[in-house]
Structure formats: C-alpha cells, structure tokens
Amino acid sequence: MTTYKTVNPATGETVKEFDALDSAGVERALESAHSGFQTWRITSPQHRSEVLGRVATLYAERADELARSISIEMGKPVKEAKGEVKLAGAIFQYYADNGPRFLEEETLDVPGAEESVVQRKPVGALVGVMPWNFPYYQVARFAGPNLMVGNTILLKHAPNCPQSALLIEEIFHQAGLPQDAYINIFATNEQIADMIADKRVQGVSLTGSERAGTSVAETAGRNLKKVVLELGGSDVFIVLDSDDIDATVKSATRARLSNAGQACNAAKRIIVTEDYYDEFVGKLTASFAATRTGDPLDENTKLGPLSSQTAADTLIEQIDDAVSKGATLLTGGKKIDGPGAYVEPTLLSDVTPDMRAYEEELFGPAGVVYKVKNAEEAVTLANSSPFGLSGSVWSSDLDNARTVAEQLEVGMAFVNEHGTTLPGLPFGGVKRSGVGRELGPWGMDEFVNKKLVRVSKS
C-alpha cells in the first residue's frame, strides 16, 4: 500500500510514491537496529563525534540539494530551506565538538566510599517520529545527541517527506555511520505502535501534534518506555512598549509568518498593551497584507504554500469559525485561487473563548492580536492557554521584561527575540506542549542510563 508520497504543495502535482514496510520489513528493521546497537554502543565517543562531524560537512556540501528537496515536498521557501539545512548541520557539529565531553563520567562528592561516579550509558534502539514542517532540523535535534550517546535510531519521517528522509539516511551512511545505526522506516502508525511495544526498542521521541503525542505516549506508557514529546504551541508575543514600533512589527511579522506560520513555536498570539495597540496593530496589519506568496523555489519568495490542501482547508475553517462568531478580520482570511495550498496572510482581533482560534493551534499564516491594559493582564492571558512551549516579551525596560518573561508558564521565554533556536539552547515545553528537552547537553540526557558506580574498600 502506498502511503508515502511527495506531493508538491505549490502545484498539487504528485512527484513520487513509496510503499510502506510490510511486516517482514518491520521485523528486519527492528532486528537490525537492535543488533547494530551491540556494536555502536561500544564504539568510542571520539569515533562517534568524528562521524557526526562528517555529517555536518556533508550537510554543507549538499545544501542546495537538501534545500530544494524540502521546498518541493513541503513548500518551504528555498532561502528558508537553506537556513534550515545550515542549522541542522550546526547541530551535528555541536555534538561532534562537545559530545565526548558531555559523556565524561561525573564524580560525586558523597562520603563513605573510595569513589562514587555517574556514567552516561546508551540504552538501545530508539524510535523517532518526526514531522514535515522542519524535515532536517527536527531529525538533527533527535538523532544528533542520541547517536552521540551510542543509541541506534529507527526514524519514521512524515509521509509527505519521503525523499528528504532518504537523503538524511544517505548522508549518515555516506559519513561512515553503520547501516544499522540509523534506519529510515516508511512505517504506518500501526506499525510504529508495534515497534514501540517491542522489547528491542527502549524509547520513543515524537515531534508533532497533540493528538499524535497522546497516542504515542499511551502506547509507550503501557509498555514502560520513556518518551520525549514536542507537541503544539500557542506562543505569545507580548509588546509592553517599544522605542521602535517599526522594528518590533517586523519582528512580529517574521515570528508569525516564517515557514508559512507552520512552526510550533511561532508567535500565534500577539498581545499588545493599550497605549501601543492602535499604532502597532495598524502597522502589523499592513505588514501582513504586504507579504506576498510565491513559488517556494524562487529565492525572493517570502511566503510559500502550506504543506497540503488539507492543511489549508483546516486553517480556513478555523478562520471562518472565528469570523462567523464575531471576530474582526483585519486582513487576509481566504485561500488563494490556483492549484497550490496557498492562504493569504491573515490577522484576527476580537477573538473570544467560544471560537476555535482561541485555544486551537493555528498552524499556518494566521495570527490573533489582543489588547491588554498592562503587563499583569498580559501574563494572565498568556498563561490561559493549555499550551506552554515558548513566548517572548518586548520592551525597552529589560528588567521589567525579564520579570514578565519569568512569569510565563512556558519551557522557553525570550526578551526582545522570539523562538531563537541554537544547538546549545534547550528546546521543549510544558503543559500540553510536551515533555522532555532537546539540544544542548540536555538533549543527551534523555535516553541514557545515568549509572551509578560506587567503589568501597572491602
């Protein structure tokens, strides 16, 4: 049965199709990853770091090819795609440079023995379930630290990114990673559930929707497997004040519309204090309206299509629901005529709790603006969401902005920047946005046996 296929969202054209694994293929993948672990676990950290360094080099050398692939598969403007490729390469290089140090044993200052140390040991084969919105970055966040630890990877990518998934696997193996240390699997959801339950798999990491995370966590829980989940977000962009409204509007536009708004940590709720609201929202509306869609393979395109017609239809349904119940449509709100999955940049105000747009994640180029009296009201509104991924606070008063940022119930809070992702910064959320952390040394601490070795005289 064909379930994995490239459908260009800019044209609607089906480019290539792939068959999902059969039951024999699932068994081969499981056994290969399990047997591969027995070898990969005992390779030296230095050797693992050298492999990841070569992966980083290949990402740089093949950047144009990699970028073009995801532009065709999920519609990311090619200039943004090249930026994603560069970031993924930087993550692999980060673990190549720092991984051996992160794995050094830790000596504990606890009396009563000659020595007490904690060692970080790999645990086995892991299943990774990755999304389409950042096809390379998401895989790098999961695979980089876990390959450095010595775990092996079974990677299920999104069904609409099969060619990108194969490129990732090809680069790993070209860099010298053993064939059975990273295995791309075109698996169904049912097959993934079976893999999670299999005794040869020791954990699962998923980046995706709240619904998918709930399903994976349920299966993992029944089988006592650890999970890392990076799920949805409804991140705030709080404007307390501004010495440069135009610059802040530019930042808000980028924070909402990058990747066609298809990012868990995009600025989906823009909260502005009343003294600045009218000017800020007027300029933000104009900025949204001036952002033109185009061919993702054109270097000048700022806003590409959504990943699919289904994604575009869902976003329009959310917008229409809000407008029908009294929300104000400031700009946009419609699909763009033509074969592609394009939606106009959209900005809504007067959104209330009875509307889908109030609590549901708007996964596309649509934002909601709210007026508040002061910082206290902004924090209350921000924390009313069931999600808690990240949020940002914008102000010329850094002390006050930091105080507000510290009150946000999120995994990542920023002042005068939004959604910053760097290899050394932890990534993850709280509440319905998931559990666990990726990147930095924290990313290497999720799927390890933190093993105590204590030596005493007889």
Image (tube, rainbow, N blue to C red):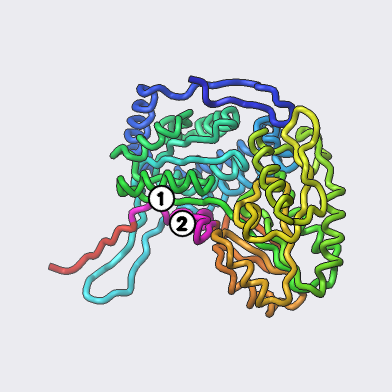
- What residue is drawn where x is 34% and y is 27%? 27
- What residue is drawn where x is 38% and y is 29%? 29
For residue 438: magenta?
yes
Residue under label 1, please give it: 227
- What residue is drawn where x is 72% and y is 50%? 324
Instruction: Answer with the quarter of the image where residue 34 lies.
Output: top left
Specify which label sits upstream in the sequence, 2 or 1: 1
Report helix, strand or loop for mark 1. strand
Q: Position of residue 19 (x, y in %)?
A: 50, 21
Nearest the viewer among 449 and 225 is 225
Q: Looking at the image, can residue 6 be seen? A: yes
Identify the magenta region: 428-449
Dot 2, crowdedness within 10 Å: few (<14), some or many (≥20)?
many
Nearest the viewer among 245 and 281 is 281
Q: Position of residue 164 (x, y in %)?
A: 60, 31
Residue under label 2, please give it: 436
Q: Position of residue 105 (x, y in %)?
A: 37, 60
Image quadrant containing the C terminus: bottom left
The amino acid pointed to by label 1 is Val
